[in-house]
C-alpha cells in the first residue's frame, strides 16, 4: 500500500531530574517561513544553477561554457551555451546546446544540439558579428565526443552504429489487420542493459568525420567492437585525439575477442585516417585510456594501470612515442588519479587535475621528471582548456561557493579569478551552515578524513540531531564542493557528518584497496568512528542519530543497522542487499564478481556473509527504503528483498518507489526535493519516538519516585 508521509511534527517535552543542555528539534520546512527564506530550503533548489565545460578561445579573449538550470514546468534540468570575455565581462546567452569546442583559428565554435532528422547533431557557429549557425550533420543516431581537425576543415565525433542480430524462425504470417504481440527481446550479450539508457540495441560505437561546412559523414572505424574505454559494458565517452598533421587519430577502446568479459581492460590504438588501418599501441594488457597527443606530434600522454587483481588502484600518468614505443611513467609516486590531461605548448610536460584528500587541484608533470602543484587550495577545481597565452579556464566550487567558471593563470602560481556568479542572487542573504574538517583514528590505526556541517544558527551549548550520510562507489570521494543536500539538512537544524572511509579514492591505492574481497568491513569501522568523533564534541543528541546513503551508501547503511542499534532511524537508498541476486540483476555484473575472490558457485559462503540481507535478523532500526522504479544499477528487487525481510521481522519499514528515476532518487528536481523531505520526516518521526522512550526510561517509567 502506498501512502503519503506527513511533513511536520510535534516536539515532545519530557521532565528530567537534571538540566542537560537544551535539545534542538529538527526545524521542519513550514515551521518558520521567515527563517526558511534565509537558509537553503528545498524550494531554493529550483533556482539553483550549475556551470560546466568552459572552453577558452585560442587567443585567450573569450570563454564559452555550459550553463544548467531547472525547468520548473517540465521538472527537468536544461542547458545552454553562454559566452563572456576572458575578464568575465559581457556574460551572455549564446545558443542552445552543449559540448562546445573552438576551431583552431578561433573563428568558429562547434557544439552539440538538437537537430534534424532527430536527436543530437553537430552544429557550427561563426563567432563574427553575424553569428550564423549551421547544422553540420543530419544523421540518424546521436553524436558525441566532438573534436576539430588540426586544420579546422573537418570535425570528428563518435556515433552508435546499429547492428542486426536476427534469430530467424518460421513464423506464419499474421492475418491481415491482426495485432500480434511483439517478438521477445533476444539477448546474447552479458551487457544488454544500462542504467539511464534501458535495454541496449545491438550495435557498436565508432569514430566518424564530416566537413566543417557540412555534407556527407565518413565512418573511420568499423567492425563488431566499440571505441571508448569502459570498465565494463558500453563506454559513456571516447578518449581520442587528432595528430597535428591530421593523418592519424589515437583512441582508446578494447578490440580484443574477450571484450565482453574484459573488466577494466583497455588499449590505445592508432588509426590512419586515409586508409582506415588500425594498429595497437599499448603492448601490455591494462586499463589504458584518455590519450592526448603533444603539440609537436611526437608523443602521447595517457593514464592507466597495468593488468592486476585489485578492487581499486590509483591510475598513473604515462607517455609513449607516437609509434607506441618508449612507454614510461611520468607521474612519479603521486598515487592519485590524474585526469583532464593537457599538454604544455612547449611539449615539456602535461597539466592535469587530481583528487587529493577531498580537494582537487591542477598539477604539472614534466617530461624530464617531477610533478609539481600548479594550484593550491581547499576546493574542487576542474581544468577546461588552455589558450595559446597560457591562460586556462576551469570550474571551481567549495563549501559555500557553488560551481562557477574561473580563470587560471598557469604562469603566475596558478592564481584563480572567478568569472561567473550564477548563484549570487539565490544565495544573497542566505545563511549557510559552517563546515569543519576533521581527522580521526579508526581500527588498525587508520586516519580518516571527514567534515561536519553545522546548522546556520549553531550553538555549541545545545544538542542537535545528527545525520551520517555515506557516499556510494564505493571507490569514490566526498569532497569540499558545495553540497545542496547537506546545506538543506543543516538548514533544518541537523548536524551532518560525511566522511571518506577506507575504500574511498583520493588517499592512495592502499587506502582505496583496503576493502578488497571484504566489502563491507573496515569501512564500517571508519564510519562508526566518525560518529564517535562528532558525539564526543558534546553537542549531539544521542537519541537522535540517523544514517543514510545511496548505492554504495545504501550497502553500508543497511550493513550498519545490522551491526549497531545506535541509530534512531535509517534512510537506505538504492542499496545492494544480496550480492548473489545482484550478480544477475545489475547492469554491471563484472563489477559485482570482482568484489569476490571466487564466484558464488565456488564459494557462496563469502557472498552471503557480505550481503546485508543475511544480517537482517539483527536489525531493529526503523528503516525507510527509497529506490528508482527504473534502476538498473542496483535494481528495485534488491530493495524489495530487504523490505520484505524487515516486514517479516516486524521492524518498522516503509518503501518509496520513485517514479521516473533510474539509479538514485534525485535526477528530477521534484524528486530531489521529495528525497530530502521524506528523509527528514522519517528521521523526525522516529527520532522523537526514541527520545520520548529514552526520557521515560530516565525517569523510571514516568511515575513519581
Image: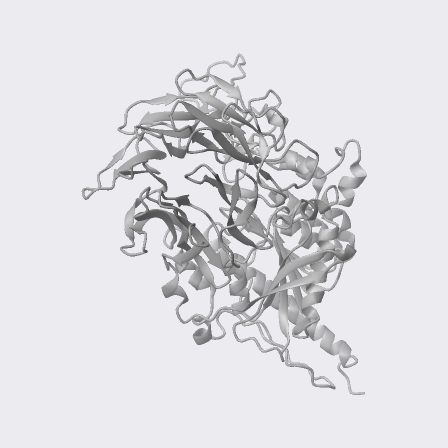
Q: Residue at x 72, y 46 (%)?
A: 515
Q: How is the image coloured?
A: one colour
In the rendered image, the quadrant that contains the C terminus is: bottom right
From the viewer's side, name the closer residue of 513 and 602: 513
Residue 312 drawn at (x, y percent): 66, 41
Q: Is residue 607 left or right of residue 469?
A: right
Residue 282 drawn at (x, y percent): 57, 26
From the viewer's side, name the closer residue of 432 and 358: 358
Q: Quadrant of residue 107?
A: top left
Q: Is residue 622 left or right of residue 67?
A: right
Q: Residue at x 43, y 71 (%)?
A: 37
Q: Residue at x 79, y 37 (%)?
A: 604
Q: Residue at x 51, y 17 (%)?
A: 166
Q: Quadrant of residue 580?
A: top right
From the viewer's side, name the closer residue of 384 and 142: 384
Q: Is residue 519 left or right of residue 392?
A: right
Q: Is residue 630 visible?
A: no
Count of numbered marks: 0
Residue that extends furthest to the front in the rendered view of this protein: 368
From the viewer's side, name the closer residue of 100 and 430: 100
Residue 444 drawn at (x, y percent): 78, 55
Q: Is residue 297 visible?
A: yes
Residue 517 drawn at (x, y percent): 74, 41
Residue that extends furthest to the left in the rendered view of this protein: 130
Q: Say above or below: 247 vs 662.
A: above
Q: Quadrant of residue 571?
A: bottom right
Amino acid at each position: 500500500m502506498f501512502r503519503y508521509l506527513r511533513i511536520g511534527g510535534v516536539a515532545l517535552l519530557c521532565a528530567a531530574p537534571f538540566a542537560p543542555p537544551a535539545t534542538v528539534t529538527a526545524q521542519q520546512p513550514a515551521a518558520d517561513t521567515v527563517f526558511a527564506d534565509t537558509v537553503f530550503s528545498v524550494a531554493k533548489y529550483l533556482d539553483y544553477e550549475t556551470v560546466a565545460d568552459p572552453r577558452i578561445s585560442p587567443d585567450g579573449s573569450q570563454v564559452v561554457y555550459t550553463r544548467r538550470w531547472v525547468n520548473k514546468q517540465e521538472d527537468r534540468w536544461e542547458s545552454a551555451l553562454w559566452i563572456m570575455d576572458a575578464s568575465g565581462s559581457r556574460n551572455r546567452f549564446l545558443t542552445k546546446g552543449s559540448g562546445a569546442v573552438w576551431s583552431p583559428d578561433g573563428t568558429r565554435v562547434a557544439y552539440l544540439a538538437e537537430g534534424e532528422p532527430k536527436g543530437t547533431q553537430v552544429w557550427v557557429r561563426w563567432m563574427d558579428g553575424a553569428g550564423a549557425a549551421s547544422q553540420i550533420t543530419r544523421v540518424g543516431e546521436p553524436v558525441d565526443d566532438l573534436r576539430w581537425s588540426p586544420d579546422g576543415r573537418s570535425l570528428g565525433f563518435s556515433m552508435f552504429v546499429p547492428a542486426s542480430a536476427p534469430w530467424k524462425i518460421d513464423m506464419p504470417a499474421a492475418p491481415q489487420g491482426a495485432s500480434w504481440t511483439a517478438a521477445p527481446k533476444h539477448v546474447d550479450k552479458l551487457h544488454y542493459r544500462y542504467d539511464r539508457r534501458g535495454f541496449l540495441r545491438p550495435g557498436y560505437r565508432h569514430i566518424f568525420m564530416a566537413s566543417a561546412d557540412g555534407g556527407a559523414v565518413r565512418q573511420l572505424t568499423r567492425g563488431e567492437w566499440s571505441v571508448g574505454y569502459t570498465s565494463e559494458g558500453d563506454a559513456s565517452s571516447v578518449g581520442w585525439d587528432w595528430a597535428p598533421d591530421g593523418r592519424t587519430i589515437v583512441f582508446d577502446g578494447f578490440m580484443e575477442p574477450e571484450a565482453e568479459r574484459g573488466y577494466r581492460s583497455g588499449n590505445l590504438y592508432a588509426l590512419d585516417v586515409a586508409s582506415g588501418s588500425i594498429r595497437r599501441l599499448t603492448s601490455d594488457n591494462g586499463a589504458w585510456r584518455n590519450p592526448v597527443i603533444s603539440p609537436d606530434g611526437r608523443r602521447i600522454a595517457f593514464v592507466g594501470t597495468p593488468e592486476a587483481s585489485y578492487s581499486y588502484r590509483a591510475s598513473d600518468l604515462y607517455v609513449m612515442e607516437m609509434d607506441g614505443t618508449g612507454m614510461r611513467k611520468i607521474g612519479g609516486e603521486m598515487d592519485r588519479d590524474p585526469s583532464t590531461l593537457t599538454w604544455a605548448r612547449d611539449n615539456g610536460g602535461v597539466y592535469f587535475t587530481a583528487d587529493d584528500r577531498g580537494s582537487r587541484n591542477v598539477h604539472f608533470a614534466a617530461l624530464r621528471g617531477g610533478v609539481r602543484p600548479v594550484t593550491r587550495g581547499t576546493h574542487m577545481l576542474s581544468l577546461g582548456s588552455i589558450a595559446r597565452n597560457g591562460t586556462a579556464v576551469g570550474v571551481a566550487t567549495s563549501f559555500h561557493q557553488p560551481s562557477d567558471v574561473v580563470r587560471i593563470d598557469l604562469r603566475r602560481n596558478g592564481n584563480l579569478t572567478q568569472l561567473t556568479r550564477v548563484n549570487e542572487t539565490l544565495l544573497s542573504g542566505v545563511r549557510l551552515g559552517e563546515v569543519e574538517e576533521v581527522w580521526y583514528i579508526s581500527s588498525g590505526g587508520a586516519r580518516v578524513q571527514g567534515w561536519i556541517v553545522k546548522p546556520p544558527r549553531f550553538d555549541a551549548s545545545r544538542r542537535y540531531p545528527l545525520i551520517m550520510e555515506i557516499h556510494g562507489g564505493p571507490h569514490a570521494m566526498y569532497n569540499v564542493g558545495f553540497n545542496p543536500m547537506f546545506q538543506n539538512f543543516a538548514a533544518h537544524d541537523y548536524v551532518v557528518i560525511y566522511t571518506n572511509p577506507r575504500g574511498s579514492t583520493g588517499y592512495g591505492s592502499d587506502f582505496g584497496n583496503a576493502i578488497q574481497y571484504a566489502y563491507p568491513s573496515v569501512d564500517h569501522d571508519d564510519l562508526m568512528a566518525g560518529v564517535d568523533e562528532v558525539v564526543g564534541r558534546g553537542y549531539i543528541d544521542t537519541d537522535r542519530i540517523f544514517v543514510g546513503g545511496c548505492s554504495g551508501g545504501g550497502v553500508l547503511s543497511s550493513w550498519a543497522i545490522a551491526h549497531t542499534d545506535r541509530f534512531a532511524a535509517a534512510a537506505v537508498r538504492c542499496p545492494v542487499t544480496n550480492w548473489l541476486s545482484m550478480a544477475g540483476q545489475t547492469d554491471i555484473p563484472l563489477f559485482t564478481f570482482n568484489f569476490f575472490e571466487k564466484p558464488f558457485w565456488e564459494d557462496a559462503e563469502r557472498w552471503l556473509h557480505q550481503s546485508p540481507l543475511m544480517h537482517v535478523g539483527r536489525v531493529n532500526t526503523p528503516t525507510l527504503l527509497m529506490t528508482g522504479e527504473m534502476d538498473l544499477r542496483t535494481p528495485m528487487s534488491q530493495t524489495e528483498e530487504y523490505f520484505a525481510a524487515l516486514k517479516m521481522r516486524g521492524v518498522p519499514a516503509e518503501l518509496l518507489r520513485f517514479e521516473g528515476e533510474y539509479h538514485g532518487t534525485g535526477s528530477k528536481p521534484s524528486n530531489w526535493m521529495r528525497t530530502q523531505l521524506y528523509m527528514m520526516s522519517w528521521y523526525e518521526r522516529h527520532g522523537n519516538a526514541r527520545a520520548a522512550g529514552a526520557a521515560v526510561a530516565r525517569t523510571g517509567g514516568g511515575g513519581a519516585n
